[in-house]
Image: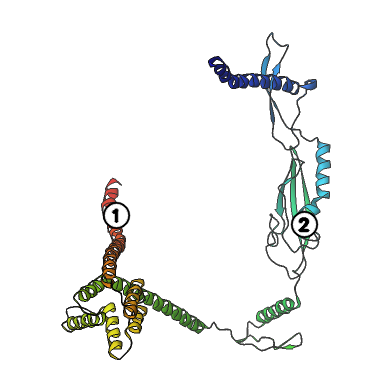
Amino acid sequence: MGLKKEQERWILPGLCVVGSLLLYVGLTFFLKGESEIVGNRLERGGYGDGSSVYEVEVDGLLEEPVDLTVEVEPRIYTEQEAERVFEEIMEGMEEKIRGKNPSLMEVREDLKLPSHWEDSGVRLLWYSENPEWISAAGKIEKTVEEPQNVQLQVHMSAGKYQAEYLIFLRLMPAIQTDEEALRSGLIKEIANREESDRSEPWMELPEIYEGRKLTYRKKEENLYAVIPILGVVMAVLLLSQEGAEQKKKEKLREKELLMDYAELVSKLMVLIGAGLTVRSAWERMVRDYESALDGKRIKRRVAYEEMRQTSFELANGIAESVAFREFGRRCGVQQYLKLSSLLEQNRRSGMKNLRAILTAEMEDAFEARKNLARTIGEEAGTKLLAPLFMMLGIVMVMIMVPAMMSMG
C-alpha cells in the first residue's frame, strides 16, 4: 500500500517533466525550418519603415556556427519610382484632403491635411500661401463673404527625393438660411453706412431694407429681472428653514417627553399605591406641577402641560377613557400611547394588577431614559469634535511653521 502511494506521488511531477521535454523537442524541430534563411535573403522593411535587425547563425565559416547581428535598412525609392509615387499621391490628393467639402472648389469647412501618405513612406509638409484665410493645418481662419481663391503648397519627401506642388482652393461663403441672409445683409449695409458717414455727427441706420420697414431701440440689460428670482429663492430658503426648525422643535419635544416619562410613571404608581384613584392621582400630580411652576422651581414641561390639559377636560365633564386616550394622542410618543391605553383599559374594565403593570413600565422607562441620556451625551461629544480638530490644526500650524522657517 505504501509503495503504491509513493508511485502515485511521482506520477504528476513525472508527467510535467516528460511533457515539457516533448514540447521543447516539438517546438525546436517545428521552428527550425522557419529559422533557416531561404536563398540567403533577408527581407527589407517597406518604404518608410524602420530598419530590421536579424540574429543569424553562419555555418561553414568556422568549425563551429558563428553568431552575427545583421541590420537591414528599409527599402528606398529610385528616382523614377519616387516621381511616379508623387504623381499618384497628387491624383488622390483632393479626395484625401477635402474632408466634408464637395470639392476643393467649394470649401466651407476645414480640410484634413495628412503629415504622411499611408503605405508609401512619403512625408508631407504643408504651407499656406494665404495664412489670413486658411492655415497650414487646413483650418479656415475666417468666413468669407465672397468666393476667395487661395493656395496651399505641399512639400513631399521620399528619402533623398523631394518635390513641391501647389494646390488651388476656393473658399465659399457659408450657406445661409433666409433669416441669416437678411441679418448678414443688414449688418453689411450698416457697416457700409458707418464707413461713409464718419464725418457726420450721427450715423443713420437704414429705415427700409429689402422692402421691410425697420425701427430700432437700444437694447438694455434688465438688471432688475433678478429681483423676482431672488425673492423666490429667499422664499424657498425661508420655507426650508422653517421646516428644519419645526423638525428640530419636534425632536426636542420628543426627547423631553421621553426623559420625563419614567418620572411621570413613577409618581403615578406611588400615588395609586397609596390608595388614590387614577383620576385623583392625576389631579394631584397636576397640582404639584402647578405649585412648582408658580414657585419658579421648574420650567414648563410638555408632558405635564398635556396632563394639565387632560385635567381641564376631566373637570369639564369629558369621560376619563376619552380624556386619557386624547392625552396619548397629543403626546404622540409610543410610550405615552401605551400609558393612555392602560389607563383607558383600567377605566373600562378595572385592572387589578395595574400597579404591577405600572411598576414594570417604570423599570422599562428608566432603562430607556438611561439609553437616551447616553445617546444625547454621544451626540454632544460628536459636536465637540469639530472644534477640537480645529484647535489641533491651529496648534500644529503654530508648531510646524516656525520649525520649517528655521530649517529654511
Q: Which residue is mark 1?
A: 397
**In the rendered view, does 328 fall on the left or right side of 275?**
right
Point out which mark residue 98 bears: 2
Residue at the image position 74 percent from the left and 47 percent from the top: 155
Tell me the kind of residue under disc 1.
Val
In this view, the residue in front, 401 or 184, is 401
Check the image and report above or below for 296 versus 155.
below
Identify the colour scheme used. rainbow
Give the x, y percent position of residue 262. 26, 70
Viewer-closest of 228 and 355: 355
Q: Secondary structure at mark 1?
A: helix
Give the crowd class for mark 1: few <14, some 14-19, many >=20 residues within 10 Å. Answer: few
74 with respect to 253 (left or right): right
Percent coordinates x, y for residue 25 in the rendering: 69, 19
Earlier sequence position, callout 1 versus callout 2:
2
> Which mark is nearer the camera, 1 or 2?
1
Q: In the rendered structure, which amino acid carries the disc numbered 2?
A: Arg
Q: How many numbered marks appear? A: 2
**Residue shown at the point (65%, 81%) measured from the top left:** 194
